[in-house]
Image (cartoon, rainbow, N blue to C red):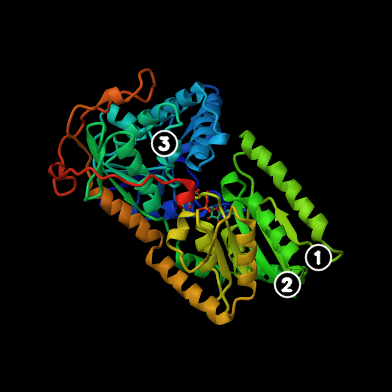
Amino acid sequence: MSRLVVVSNRVAMPDQAGGASVGGLTMALAAALQHYRGLWFGWSGETTPAFTGEVHVRETGGVAIATIDLEDQDVQEYYNGYANTVLWPLFHYRIDLTEYERAFGEGYARVNARFADTLLSQIRPDDLIWVHDYHLIPLAQELRRRGLTNRIGFFLHIPWPACQLMTTLPHHQALVEALFAYDLVGFQTQDWLSAFEGYVVDELGGEVHDNGCVSAFGRTVRAGAFPIGIDVDNLTEIVKSATAAKSYDRAAATNVYRQLIIGIDRIDYSKGLEERFAAYAQFLETNPEFRERVSYLQIAQTSRSAVGAYQDIRIRLDGVAGRINAAYGTLDWTPLRYVNRSYGRDFLAGVYRAAAIGLVTPLRDGMNLVAKEYVAAQNPRDPGVLILSRFAGAARQMKSALIVNPYSREDVADAIKRALIMPKVERIERWEALMLGLRTEDVSGWRDAFVDALKTSQSKLHSVPDSAASAPGSPMLTPVPPTRLALDSAICPVSRLRRRKLAVLSPSDL
Ligand code: ADQ
């Protein structure tokens, strides 16, 4: 069996993080690596005065972990800069928050080159390489430049933006061209895949084929939707743990006469927390009979605190939470408990189970694992109700949730009321449908679908790359060398090329 090499910005094996703040994605990657006895490569999270290129290798739980340290300037330009002040807001439709600085692009290209330089020595000839997320889009291009011929796949965990938004990015074509150095490019949902295909057709004059391949820049690569899932069995197991039982009791005890609404998120403007708080206030305002009969607990872990937009949203959320409690709170009732900390998965599982409503209302989200975790943690005989934003990738699968428009506080407020009074028989019916979906498309299915597709995908260079499409001078613009010309014609038969016009997504389309 080929070894799997996972490459992501950061590496955090569950036991290393003590289980405390390990999210679903980390669990998913750790499980994939244990299954394939692979290597996980990424930034250590540490900085060094001058980049050394030294790779620190160790073994944890049957998985080899290889990390590198970066310079402060790298972290500032690549991570805080290009990744989280350019790509993250742009891909989440917040071009108002993007700051395009040339130094950010240079730092992004430099760190991707550093990843390639240091990763190369770790790769064996038959390794499958799986690169994760927007931090590392140019990595395959860098590896190909260094002569690597292994199969390389890329998975984007976040949305792909509509074409008109993508074109606001300076050198957007160069960034997309870098994706054509992969053998397989995966998206969370058909929506994000369609947006990517729309860009390829409308902006690049490229082509989308019936067999799931796309062509542009003289290359053909396979692109598909691979919705990420959760480990349902693991969650239904940990919800029975002693820690989960304790957190359930604590959450239930403080809400003996009240129904609990739970929100669990990283603090991020994409998660729609401000809008959610406003919708809850709207619910209290228009449904006074429910005051003191509900309690909303929002657990919000701080993230990316070096980035200005994240500092701003924290300040605003503190203010809104304070105003809601001041306006509606009473001597013995705090309407909104807003907690800025991270908890272990087992602790969270108990809190999920105690909640009558899981409130998951991002303004834009690649998938959203919290929605899935909430459902998996419910009591089958008395499950709570999931309220889910239509703009989360998860809404494409979880159609039995109460689907809401997070921009409309009235819509969300109505859904809260509907969930609170929903008959048990309807709650069970909806929950059973949601659970069936979670089990059908769980995390191992996601992993195997991607890895199996990667094993049989091979990109093809079928003409000289059209470098005229790229603006000169960017570090990300050199055409990809033709490292492999072979192509399984059953996978990407160029003779059946067909141009297909695709609808370009816009926020209001979704
Ligand atoms: P995120 O934006 O981080 O992930 P999400 O999918 O909700 O969003 O995953 C968050 C994870 O962190 C969950 O597993 C959750 O339990 C955990 N978590 C959140 N708050 C926590 C807290 N306070 N304490 C402890 N754990 C907490 C990105 C994309 C998503 C996509 C995932 C996976 O933005 O759209 O679903 O990757 O592909």
Q: Is residue 111 left or right of residue 208?
A: right
Question: Disc number at residue 161?
Answer: none
How many labels, in total? 3
For residue 200, above or below residue 374: above
Distance from the alpha carbon under mark 1 to that under mark 3: 47 Å
Is tag 2's residue or tag 3's residue first in the polypeptide sequence? 3
The image quarter containing residue 460 is top left
- Identify which residue, 223 or 119, lies in the foreground: 223
User: Do residues under tags 1 and 2 come within 8 Å of each other at their CB atoms?
Assistant: yes
State the SS at label 3: helix
Residue picked out by circle 3: 136
The image quarter containing residue 264 is bottom right
Q: Nearer the viewer, mark 1 or mark 3?
A: 1
Q: Residue at x 73, y 64 (%)?
A: 286
Name the amino acid, label 1: Trp
Q: Is residue 194 left or right of residue 258?
A: left
Distance from the alpha carbon under mark 2 to that under mark 3: 46 Å
Q: Residue at x 39, y 22 (%)?
A: 475
Is tag 1's residue or tag 2's residue first in the polypeptide sequence? 2
Q: Is residue 227 left or right of residue 244?
A: left
Residue 472 screen position, x and y as percent: 35, 18
Residue picked out by circle 2: 258
State the SS at label 1: loop
User: Do residues under tags 2 and 3 come within 8 Å of each other at their CB atoms?
Assistant: no
Q: Residue at x 59, y 39 (%)?
A: 304
